[in-house]
Amino acid sequence: MSRFNTELFIARRIYSARGTSVKFSESIVSFAVFGIAFGLFVMILSVAIVTGFKNEVRNKVIGFGSHIQIVNFDSNSSYETVPVSKEQRWLADLKQMDGIKGVQTFATKPGIIKTDEEIHGIVLKGVGTDFDWKFFKDNLVEGSLFSVTDSVKTDDILISRQVAMLLKLKVGDPLYTYFLNEESKTQRMRKFKICGIFSTSLQEFDQLFVLADLAQVQKLNDWTSDQISGFEVTINDFDNLEPLVHKIRSLTISYSQDNETVLRPVSIASKYPQIFDWLNLLDMNVWIILGLIIMVAGFNMVSGLLILILERTSMIGILKAVGFENISIRKIFLYLSSILIVRGMFWGNIAGIVFCLVQAKFGTFQLDPTSYYLDTVPINLKISHLVMLNVGTMAVTLLMLIVPSWYISRIEPDKAIRFD
């Protein structure tokens, strides 16, 4: 037979009789509950917005270069690359590796776009029949994507809206580009046709990359149809990026032989460290915000608990007089505080979740893309985040309440009963 929880029963009776309390104490307790609700609301928004911002910016950077690039060991950080063979013995094993989503070929060639009035430096990125167009399809603002076939190379290209505005170009216009061949030191001109315009709001990438047929880049580099700049690998989980880089490095080394081209995998985080280091700094900002908010909410609850104890001093004296121990009376007020905290957390969750869902659905709050890389406030609302925030808020707040609850042990029954 289960033991009747007397402390919880008394705490519930006190909570249900709150309307008979002194107005001053009632307002203090209500303010403490509001502090919990507002604090949790802000914490939900902080985590959802910061993680959403990180995911959106990270996915845009990955859209231009995938998670991992496998290139020639002799290639440097420039876009003038040393070619590798498209046929690799380890390729089949790579595609079957756990955590790998897809593998595609690519080639790059730095060049210049020239119009009657402007010139602009670009990187022509060649993509093949295995290219995943989803990222550029989602960010296409005008025109259409071009199709790549093995039989005939196309003159269609994809440029960004930023380049189009800078050079006063539109869909259907011819594009005259100039490239320098490193070996022959000769300049080559190619005429392309703009079939589509994309916009990702990542200024340094939008103004740099132009997408074309892989065969066009191979021809500009004087490469054969078997030669490419490397392979782009997409993975299922970004958190597994570094472990997969090590696995891929081990895989390529295991197949290498003497006098063969040495390949190396390069993660997107190491290719663009300035961006990913900046994104990692946002985690520290979130922890600081969460810490400050939960401290403020906790101190509000501490003041509320002390008011409740002072208001019920006579009751505490009576309970001690009839044989209640200090620890049992402390449990009563901790149970009561838990009820108030849960009430505040309930409304904080409702407000935070509703706000996030509305923002995710309608994009009510806008951003300046030139400053934030996004046009709306991003939202990444996860159940796991909600659970951790709620559990953390409850745990930290209750821990903060343990110390002020010791005040009960200092109350003497004879004085408390006469307390007014």
Image (spheres, rainbow, N blue to C red):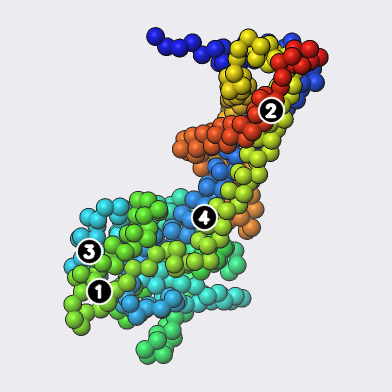
Which residue appears at 60% of the width and 75% of the height?
118
Q: Which residue is mark 3?
A: 91
- Front position in the image: 361 or 71: 71
Q: Give the mark toward the camera: 1 or 4.
A: 4
- Above-or-below relation of 323 to 226: above
Q: Earlier in the sequence, mark 1 or mark 2?
A: 1
Query: Which residue type carries mark 4?
Result: Val
Mark 3–mark 1 contact, CB under 8 Å? Answer: no
Q: Quadrant of the N terminus?
A: top left
Q: For residue 227, what is the image quadrant? A: bottom left
Which residue appears at 44% of the width and 68% of the height?
271
Q: Give the mark toward the camera: 4 or 2.
A: 2
**Image position, residue 200 (x, y; %):** 52, 56
Cα separation between marks 3 and 1: 11 Å
Cα separation between marks 4 and 2: 51 Å
Give me the disc on residue 57. Answer: 4
Label 1: element kind: strand
Cα separation between marks 4 and 3: 29 Å
Q: Earlier in the sequence, mark 3 or mark 1?
A: 1
Q: Residues within 10 Å of mark 3 (few under 14, many from 20)?
A: some
Cα separation between marks 1 and 4: 32 Å
- Front position in the image: 125 or 212: 125
Which residue appears at 37% of the width and 63% of the height?
68
Q: Which residue is mark 2?
A: 407
Which residue appears at 37% of the width and 51% of the height?
237
Q: Residues within 10 Å of mark 4 (few under 14, many from 20)?
A: many
